[in-house]
Image (cartoon, rainbow, N blue to C red):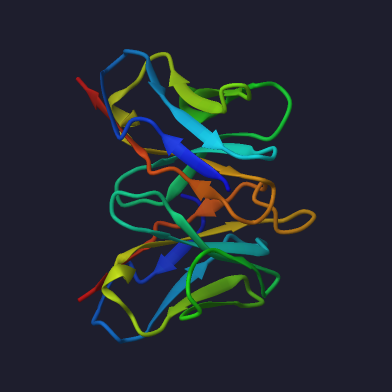
Amino acid sequence: ETGVTQSPTHLIKTRGQQVTLRCSSQSGHNTVSWYQQALGQGPQFIFQYYREEENGRGNFPPRFSGLQFPNYSSELNVNALELDDSALYLCASSFGTSGPYTTDTQYFGPGTRLTVL
Amino acid sequence: AQSVTQLDSQVPVFEEAPVELRCNYSSSVSVYLFWYVQYPNQGLQLLLKYLSGSTLVKGINGFEAEFNKSQTSFHLRKPSVHISDTAEYFCAADTGGFKTIFGAGTRLFVKA
Protein backbone atom coordinates (compact mmCIF):
# COMPACT_ATOMS: atom_id res chain seq x y z
CA GLU A 1 0.00 0.00 0.00
CA THR A 2 1.44 3.34 -1.05
CA GLY A 3 -1.27 5.54 0.46
CA VAL A 4 -2.15 6.86 -2.99
CA THR A 5 -5.67 6.12 -4.14
CA GLN A 6 -7.37 6.62 -7.48
CA SER A 7 -10.99 6.61 -8.56
CA PRO A 8 -12.76 5.16 -10.32
CA THR A 9 -11.03 1.80 -10.80
CA HIS A 10 -12.54 1.24 -14.22
CA LEU A 11 -14.39 3.51 -16.60
CA ILE A 12 -16.00 3.06 -20.00
CA LYS A 13 -16.67 6.07 -22.22
CA THR A 14 -17.52 6.66 -25.85
CA ARG A 15 -15.53 8.65 -28.37
CA GLY A 16 -16.04 12.40 -28.04
CA GLN A 17 -17.03 12.33 -24.38
CA GLN A 18 -15.16 13.95 -21.52
CA VAL A 19 -13.77 12.18 -18.46
CA THR A 20 -12.40 13.19 -15.05
CA LEU A 21 -10.09 10.89 -13.12
CA ARG A 22 -9.21 11.51 -9.49
CA CYS A 23 -6.19 10.90 -7.33
CA SER A 24 -5.66 11.28 -3.62
CA SER A 25 -2.00 11.71 -2.74
CA GLN A 26 -0.15 10.65 0.37
CA SER A 27 -0.69 13.13 3.16
CA GLY A 28 1.72 16.07 2.85
CA HIS A 29 2.89 15.29 -0.67
CA ASN A 30 3.15 18.51 -2.67
CA THR A 31 3.85 17.03 -6.09
CA VAL A 32 1.69 14.82 -8.29
CA SER A 33 2.47 13.41 -11.71
CA TRP A 34 0.11 11.72 -14.13
CA TYR A 35 1.06 8.95 -16.55
CA GLN A 36 -0.70 7.09 -19.35
CA GLN A 37 0.13 3.40 -19.70
CA ALA A 38 -1.17 1.81 -22.89
CA LEU A 39 -1.47 -1.96 -22.98
CA GLY A 40 1.92 -3.63 -23.18
CA GLN A 41 3.85 -0.38 -22.84
CA GLY A 42 5.60 1.58 -20.15
CA PRO A 43 4.02 4.63 -18.56
CA GLN A 44 4.18 7.87 -20.57
CA PHE A 45 4.50 11.14 -18.65
CA ILE A 46 1.49 13.43 -19.14
CA PHE A 47 2.18 16.31 -16.73
CA GLN A 48 3.19 17.19 -13.22
CA TYR A 49 1.72 19.58 -10.65
CA TYR A 50 3.74 21.14 -7.87
CA ARG A 51 1.96 23.17 -5.20
CA GLU A 52 -1.15 23.49 -7.37
CA GLU A 53 0.64 24.72 -10.51
CA GLU A 54 1.51 22.75 -13.63
CA ASN A 55 5.25 22.25 -13.54
CA GLY A 56 5.81 20.47 -16.83
CA ARG A 57 4.10 18.50 -19.55
CA GLY A 58 4.92 15.59 -21.81
CA ASN A 59 3.86 15.15 -25.44
CA PHE A 60 0.14 15.24 -24.83
CA PRO A 61 -2.36 17.65 -26.46
CA PRO A 62 -4.15 20.41 -24.54
CA ARG A 63 -7.32 18.32 -24.26
CA PHE A 64 -5.44 16.61 -21.41
CA SER A 65 -5.62 18.98 -18.44
CA GLY A 66 -5.33 18.76 -14.72
CA LEU A 67 -5.85 20.34 -11.35
CA GLN A 68 -4.19 19.96 -7.98
CA PHE A 69 -6.07 21.04 -4.87
CA PRO A 70 -4.81 22.43 -1.53
CA ASN A 71 -5.53 19.10 0.14
CA TYR A 72 -3.12 17.50 -2.41
CA SER A 73 -5.84 15.62 -4.24
CA SER A 74 -5.77 16.05 -7.99
CA GLU A 75 -7.73 15.48 -11.18
CA LEU A 76 -6.91 14.54 -14.73
CA ASN A 77 -9.44 15.73 -17.30
CA VAL A 78 -9.56 14.50 -20.85
CA ASN A 79 -11.86 16.15 -23.40
CA ALA A 80 -13.01 14.85 -26.78
CA LEU A 81 -11.99 11.29 -26.02
CA GLU A 82 -10.38 9.26 -28.79
CA LEU A 83 -10.06 5.51 -29.12
CA ASP A 84 -6.29 5.77 -28.51
CA ASP A 85 -6.96 7.28 -25.09
CA SER A 86 -7.86 3.80 -23.86
CA ALA A 87 -5.20 3.03 -21.26
CA LEU A 88 -4.35 2.70 -17.59
CA TYR A 89 -3.90 6.14 -16.05
CA LEU A 90 -1.54 6.34 -13.11
CA CYS A 91 -0.92 9.12 -10.68
CA ALA A 92 2.19 9.35 -8.56
CA SER A 93 2.76 11.61 -5.60
CA SER A 94 5.98 12.74 -3.98
CA PHE A 95 7.30 15.29 -1.55
CA GLY A 96 9.62 17.78 -3.19
CA THR A 97 12.04 18.96 -0.54
CA SER A 98 13.51 21.67 -2.73
CA GLY A 99 11.31 21.64 -5.79
CA PRO A 100 9.39 19.14 -7.91
CA TYR A 101 12.29 16.85 -8.80
CA THR A 102 11.74 13.24 -9.71
CA THR A 103 14.70 12.13 -7.66
CA ASP A 104 12.25 12.28 -4.80
CA THR A 105 10.59 8.89 -4.52
CA GLN A 106 7.28 8.73 -6.36
CA TYR A 107 4.46 6.69 -4.86
CA PHE A 108 2.06 5.32 -7.45
CA GLY A 109 -1.62 4.67 -7.13
CA PRO A 110 -3.22 1.51 -8.56
CA GLY A 111 -4.50 3.34 -11.62
CA THR A 112 -7.78 3.90 -13.45
CA ARG A 113 -8.46 1.69 -16.45
CA LEU A 114 -10.18 3.83 -19.12
CA THR A 115 -11.81 2.18 -22.11
CA VAL A 116 -13.01 4.36 -24.97
CA LEU A 117 -15.50 2.75 -27.37
CA ALA B 1 16.83 12.98 -26.48
CA GLN B 2 16.52 10.50 -23.70
CA SER B 3 15.38 6.95 -24.27
CA VAL B 4 15.25 3.76 -22.25
CA THR B 5 15.45 0.32 -23.85
CA GLN B 6 14.63 -2.87 -22.04
CA LEU B 7 16.24 -5.59 -24.06
CA ASP B 8 13.92 -8.46 -23.14
CA SER B 9 10.15 -8.31 -23.25
CA GLN B 10 9.79 -11.57 -21.33
CA VAL B 11 12.15 -13.51 -19.09
CA PRO B 12 11.11 -16.97 -17.92
CA VAL B 13 13.18 -18.44 -15.09
CA PHE B 14 12.89 -21.29 -12.61
CA GLU B 15 12.40 -20.62 -8.93
CA GLU B 16 15.64 -20.14 -6.95
CA ALA B 17 17.61 -19.43 -10.14
CA PRO B 18 19.41 -16.09 -10.66
CA VAL B 19 17.96 -13.52 -13.01
CA GLU B 20 19.17 -10.42 -14.84
CA LEU B 21 16.82 -7.92 -16.48
CA ARG B 22 18.64 -5.71 -18.94
CA CYS B 23 18.22 -1.98 -19.42
CA ASN B 24 20.10 0.48 -21.61
CA TYR B 25 19.59 4.21 -21.64
CA SER B 26 20.47 6.95 -24.03
CA SER B 27 21.23 10.41 -22.80
CA SER B 28 23.69 13.17 -23.55
CA VAL B 29 23.65 14.36 -19.97
CA SER B 30 23.89 12.77 -16.55
CA VAL B 31 20.89 10.68 -15.68
CA TYR B 32 19.17 9.32 -12.67
CA LEU B 33 18.02 5.72 -13.08
CA PHE B 34 15.23 3.71 -11.50
CA TRP B 35 13.72 0.25 -11.47
CA TYR B 36 10.04 -0.21 -10.69
CA VAL B 37 7.94 -3.35 -10.27
CA GLN B 38 4.27 -3.62 -11.20
CA TYR B 39 2.18 -6.52 -9.91
CA PRO B 40 -1.11 -7.35 -11.67
CA ASN B 41 -3.80 -4.73 -11.13
CA GLN B 42 -1.50 -2.56 -9.07
CA GLY B 43 0.50 0.62 -9.55
CA LEU B 44 4.26 0.81 -9.77
CA GLN B 45 6.51 0.32 -6.76
CA LEU B 46 10.07 1.63 -6.60
CA LEU B 47 12.64 -1.16 -6.28
CA LEU B 48 15.77 0.99 -6.31
CA LYS B 49 17.29 4.14 -7.74
CA TYR B 50 20.70 5.41 -8.74
CA LEU B 51 21.36 9.10 -8.20
CA SER B 52 25.11 9.26 -7.70
CA GLY B 53 27.94 7.58 -5.79
CA SER B 54 28.42 3.83 -5.70
CA THR B 55 27.52 2.20 -8.97
CA LEU B 56 26.07 -0.86 -7.22
CA VAL B 57 22.65 -0.07 -5.84
CA LYS B 58 20.76 -2.36 -3.50
CA GLY B 59 16.99 -2.25 -3.38
CA ILE B 60 14.07 -3.98 -1.79
CA ASN B 61 13.17 -7.66 -2.05
CA GLY B 62 16.80 -8.70 -2.61
CA PHE B 63 17.21 -6.89 -5.94
CA GLU B 64 20.28 -4.92 -6.93
CA ALA B 65 21.39 -3.03 -10.02
CA GLU B 66 24.69 -1.82 -11.38
CA PHE B 67 25.15 1.49 -13.16
CA ASN B 68 27.66 1.22 -16.01
CA LYS B 69 28.32 4.60 -17.56
CA SER B 70 30.60 3.34 -20.34
CA GLN B 71 28.00 0.83 -21.50
CA THR B 72 25.05 3.11 -20.64
CA SER B 73 23.41 0.22 -18.84
CA PHE B 74 21.55 -0.30 -15.59
CA HIS B 75 20.82 -4.03 -15.36
CA LEU B 76 18.71 -5.44 -12.53
CA ARG B 77 19.76 -8.65 -10.81
CA LYS B 78 18.58 -11.05 -8.15
CA PRO B 79 20.62 -14.08 -7.10
CA SER B 80 17.61 -16.30 -6.33
CA VAL B 81 14.06 -15.57 -7.46
CA HIS B 82 10.78 -16.60 -5.88
CA ILE B 83 7.38 -17.29 -7.40
CA SER B 84 6.23 -14.02 -5.84
CA ASP B 85 8.71 -12.08 -8.01
CA THR B 86 6.52 -12.76 -11.06
CA ALA B 87 5.60 -9.27 -12.25
CA GLU B 88 6.34 -6.57 -14.82
CA TYR B 89 9.57 -4.65 -14.28
CA PHE B 90 10.20 -1.17 -15.65
CA CYS B 91 13.48 0.66 -16.03
CA ALA B 92 13.23 4.45 -16.01
CA ALA B 93 15.48 7.48 -16.39
CA ASP B 94 15.43 11.22 -16.03
CA THR B 95 17.90 14.07 -16.06
CA GLY B 96 16.88 15.55 -12.75
CA GLY B 97 13.88 17.44 -14.01
CA PHE B 98 10.26 16.60 -13.77
CA LYS B 99 9.94 14.06 -16.55
CA THR B 100 10.60 10.36 -16.08
CA ILE B 101 11.08 8.22 -19.20
CA PHE B 102 10.08 4.58 -18.84
CA GLY B 103 11.11 1.54 -20.84
CA ALA B 104 8.51 -0.78 -22.34
CA GLY B 105 8.83 -3.26 -19.51
CA THR B 106 10.09 -6.80 -18.98
CA ARG B 107 7.73 -9.51 -17.81
CA LEU B 108 9.47 -11.80 -15.35
CA PHE B 109 7.80 -15.18 -15.09
CA VAL B 110 9.08 -17.44 -12.32
CA LYS B 111 8.28 -21.12 -12.76
CA ALA B 112 8.11 -23.73 -10.02
The spot of residue A71 in percent (x, y) is 63, 74
Q: Which picture quadrant has residue B105?
A: top left
Q: Which picture quadrant has residue A12?
A: bottom left
Residue B14 located left or right of residue A32? left
Which residue is nearer to you in this view: B13 or A59? A59
Q: Does the image show residue A106? A: yes
Up-down: is B101 above or below A57? above
Up-down: is A106 above or below B33? below
The residue located at (73%, 25%) in the rendering is B53
How many circles with numbers are drawn on the protein? 0
Q: Determine the residue located farthest toward the right in the rendered image.
A: A98
Which residue is nearer to you in this view: B33 or A108? B33
Residue B90 located left or right of residue B71? left
The residue located at (69%, 47%) in the rendering is B96
The spot of residue A49 in percent (x, y) is 63, 68
Q: Does the image show residue B47? A: no
Q: Which quadrant of the figure contains the C terminus of chain A?
A: bottom left
Q: Which picture quadrant has residue A37?
A: bottom left
The residue located at (58%, 51%) in the rendering is A106
Up-down: is A13 above or below B45? below
The spot of residue A64 in percent (x, y) is 47, 76
Residue A93 located left or right of residue A63? right
The residue located at (47%, 27%) in the rendering is B61
The spot of residue A33 in percent (x, y) is 56, 62
